[in-house]
């Protein structure tokens, strides 16, 4: 299917009418949603205030791309108006503001919601576009400035968020996605799957030209897909410091192993897509950071390292028959020894963790076992590594935590040649290791 | 009175001549059978090569490695790649078929009946082989899925659950195979029903008596929709 031909496919007829009415826009801000009635009003007000305060001369369009909410989310978007213009010192807006709340077509998921936003942005010839999550409680009007101004000023094509988070939060990002993306594509994007991004019309065109909208990208994994696509196509990258990210409590039924499968699977899939590119990258470099760095208080996170270690140990005892298909005996022996350790002496070293992730990537590539089984079998190891991380950083302040993450990233980069070797074994049909 | 020469002719030379005549009459059939066997050897070898090549093209060796079939074969002493084993089996089947045709060519009544029965039974054998292979692969897949899922849900009996799933599916595949081969149909069906019923009854008893409190807590949580929280659920992983 030619994605170019399919432009507009994700849009309903009333959206086409809306586009005809608006004609063109400077900025499009998209909010994907699904049953976010509790929080979306705040997000919409922040977007309205942000556009009015920082882009008064620009014509701005807010698009709520909804996945069929039953709690009145789109209605809240339609009815929400920021009324405190004088209280917020908002200037007179001359550019114009329009909004639309529309259900998207296609596979259910954030990716399909984004596709509808991209299509509207493209039809309106938007110079800059931003997407923000609908469950945010900490978004402020300044987020819009930080995500959009680097694009409007032509300094960046893709702006990723940088949040200050609790040292135990974002562990999949900190221990896998950030260091791996950085080692693979050579740019230090600290939150590649942050959820809130700014990007140019060029990036919108690039995203829409990719034939991924009937794949898992449409369902989940759109964040890492956008960041990686921008990196691999050498768009001008930047980061924006947004402070802390507080959002609605997550769905308690969300399963950790499903989360790992989706996030890590998306990252590994992109490794196959951009194999030629990442193999040629040998080092990483920082990207420009916008925004004033300041410290913020973060919500406390309760963890029980002892129970996590127990879960890790149980996993090691049970999953040997799965892991022996793609992990070397030496590593399996080391894991078995570690499974006998107690809280006081438990330590899953960063070196071992990087090896594990690289073996998993190679096993994914060589299709050594069913991919869902493969990635879900990572869960106990991830819990073990997280327990180790919790114990390592008990006394660390934010700077100390960042130093440890930096050391982990360097290990990922140093061991990249090992990844390439394992990966190529998979390409040749051999089992990794 | 019969002379010695008549006796010799009657008792020795005539039977030998008759046997010679019989052999002469039977020789073309025998030579034909031998010829068929030789053709069978050639066709069998060609089939072996072709099937092995085709299976390699389909990456069957990688699939077998991935799904654990290769490991099972290796444990059973079969170290060669599955593509080669498959080719060999196909080759031997072809050779066996030619052997049966050669046997039919000998025009022996018992061999004819044997050939007819063999040809009628052959599809069942193929179907049984397919069912066993499919059953094995499916059992492995679901056992692994059950193992990973049970481990991730913190169940201590995860390996036991996986073994149970594997055994149940293998037993089911074996029952279907026996059914196809027509071996002890009723016995297999009754055994399967008793075993399955026994397992379910045993689990129900174990859960009902041994785990009354767990059952009550579980149902209480489910009905009141209080999700159980793990120690790391406060962490925002992404």
Image (spheres, rainbow, N blue to C red):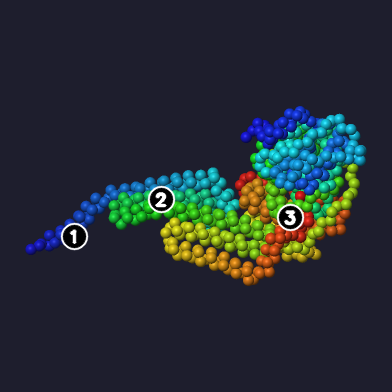
- Residue A363 visible? The answer is yes
For the residue pair A364 and A334, the one nearer the viewer reads as A364
Q: Nearer the viewer, mark 3 or mark 1?
A: 3
The chain containing the residue under callout 2 comes to: B
In the rendered image, which residue does mark 2 sit on? B95
The chain containing the residue under callout 3 comes to: A
In the rendered image, which residue does mark 1 sit on? B12
Q: Is residue B66 above or below residue B221?
A: above
| Mark 3 secondary-structure assignment | loop
In this picture, residue A151 sits left or right of residue B119: right
Q: CA distance from mark 3 to mark 1?
A: 99 Å
Q: CA distance from mark 2 to mark 3?
A: 62 Å
Instruction: Determine contact: label 2, label 3, CB under 8 Å.
Output: no
What residue do we see at 64% from left, 50% from top?
Answer: A371
Q: Position of residue A258 (x, y in %)?
A: 69, 52
Residue at the bottom extreme, as displayed: B209
Q: Quadrant of the N terminus of chain A?
A: top right
In the rendered image, which residue does mark 3 sit on? A252
For the residue pair B72 and B120, the one nearer the viewer reads as B120
Residue B184, disc: none
| Disc 3: CA contacts within 10 A as few (<14), some (14-19) or many (>=20) | few
| Disc 2: CA contacts within 10 A as few (<14), some (14-19) or many (>=20) | many
Q: CA distance from mark 2 to mark 1?
A: 40 Å
What residue do we see at 63% from left, 68% from top?
Answer: B207
| Mark 2 secondary-structure assignment | helix
Q: Nearer the viewer, mark 2 or mark 1?
A: 2
């Amino acid at each position: 299917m030619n994605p170019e031909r399919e432009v507009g496919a994700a849009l309903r007829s009333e959206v086409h009418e809306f586009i005809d009415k608006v004609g063109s826009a400077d900025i499009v801000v998209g909010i994907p949603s699904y049953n976010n009635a509790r929080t979306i009003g705040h997000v919409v007000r922040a977007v309205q205030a942000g556009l009015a305060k920082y882009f008064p001369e620009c014509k701005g369009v807010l698009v709520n791309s909804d996945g069929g909410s039953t709690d009145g989310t789109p209605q809240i978007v339609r009815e929400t108006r920021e009324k405190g213009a004088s209280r917020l010192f908002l200037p007179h807006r001359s550019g114009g503001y329009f909004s639309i709340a529309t259900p998207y077509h296609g596979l259910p998921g954030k990716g399909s919601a984004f596709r509808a936003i991209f299509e509207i942005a493209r039809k309106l010839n938007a110079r800059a576009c931003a997407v923000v999550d609908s469950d945010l409680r900490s978004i402020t009007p300044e987020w819009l400035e930080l995500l959009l101004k680097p694009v409007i000023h032509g300094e960046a094509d893709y702006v990723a968020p940088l949040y200050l988070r609790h040292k135990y939060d974002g562990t999949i990002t900190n221990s896998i996605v950030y260091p791996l993306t950085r080692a693979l594509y050579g740019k230090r994007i600290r939150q590649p799957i942050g959820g809130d991004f700014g990007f140019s019309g060029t990036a919108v065109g690039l995203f829409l030209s990719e034939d991924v909208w009937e794949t898992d990208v449409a369902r989940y994994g759109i964040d890492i897909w956008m960041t990686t696509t921008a990196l691999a196509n050498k768009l001008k990258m930047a980061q924006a410091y947004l402070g802390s990210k507080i959002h609605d409590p997550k769905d308690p039924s969300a399963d950790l192993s499903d989360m790992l499968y989706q996030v890590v699977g998306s990252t590994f899939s992109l490794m196959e897509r951009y194999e030629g590119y990442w193999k040629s990258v040998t080092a990483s470099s920082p990207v420009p950071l916008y925004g004033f760095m300041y410290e913020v208080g973060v919500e406390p996170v309760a963890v029980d390292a002892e129970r996590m270690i127990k879960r890790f140990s149980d996993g090691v005892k049970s999953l040997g028959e799965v892991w022996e298909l793609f992990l070397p005996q030496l590593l399996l022996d080391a894991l078995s020894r570690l499974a006998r350790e107690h809280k006081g002496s438990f330590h899953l070293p960063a070196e071992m963790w990087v090896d594990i992730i690289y073996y998993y990537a190679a096993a994914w590539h060589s299709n050594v076992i069913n991919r869902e089984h493969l990635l879900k079998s990572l869960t106990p190891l991830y819990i073990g590594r997280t327990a180790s991380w919790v114990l390592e950083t008990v006394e660390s302040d934010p700077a100390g935590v960042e130093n440890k993450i930096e050391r982990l990233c360097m290990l990922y980069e140093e061991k990249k040649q090992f990844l390439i070797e394992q990966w190529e074994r998979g390409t040749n049909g051999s089992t990794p290791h | 009175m019969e002379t010695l020469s008549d006796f010799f002719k009657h008792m020795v030379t005539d039977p030998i001549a008759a046997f010679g005549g019989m052999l002469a009459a039977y020789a073309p059939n025998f030579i034909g059978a031998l010829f068929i066997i030789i053709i069978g050897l050639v066709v069998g070898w060609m089939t072996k090569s072709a099937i092995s090549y085709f299976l390699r093209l389909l990456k069957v060796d990688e699939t077998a490695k991935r799904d654990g079939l290769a490991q099972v074969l290796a444990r059973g002493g079969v170290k060669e790649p599955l593509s080669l084993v498959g080719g060999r089996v196909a080759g031997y089947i072809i050779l066996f078929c030619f052997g049966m045709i050669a046997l039919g060519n000998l025009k022996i009544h018992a061999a004819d009946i044997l050939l007819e029965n063999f040809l009628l039974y052959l599809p069942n054998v193929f179907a049984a082989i397919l069912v066993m292979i499919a059953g094995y692969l499916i059992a492995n897949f679901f056992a692994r899925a059950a193992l990973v899922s049970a481990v991730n849900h913190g169940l201590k009996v995860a390996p036991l659950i996986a073994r149970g799933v594997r055994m149940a599916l293998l037993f089911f595949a074996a029952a279907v195979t026996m059914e196809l081969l027509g071996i002890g149909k009723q016995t297999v069906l009754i055994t399967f029903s008793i075993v399955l019923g026994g397992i379910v009854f045993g689990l129900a008893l174990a859960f009902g008596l041994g785990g009354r409190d767990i059952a009550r807590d579980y149902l209480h949580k489910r009905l009141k929709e209080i999700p159980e929280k793990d120690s790391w659920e406060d962490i925002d992983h992404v």
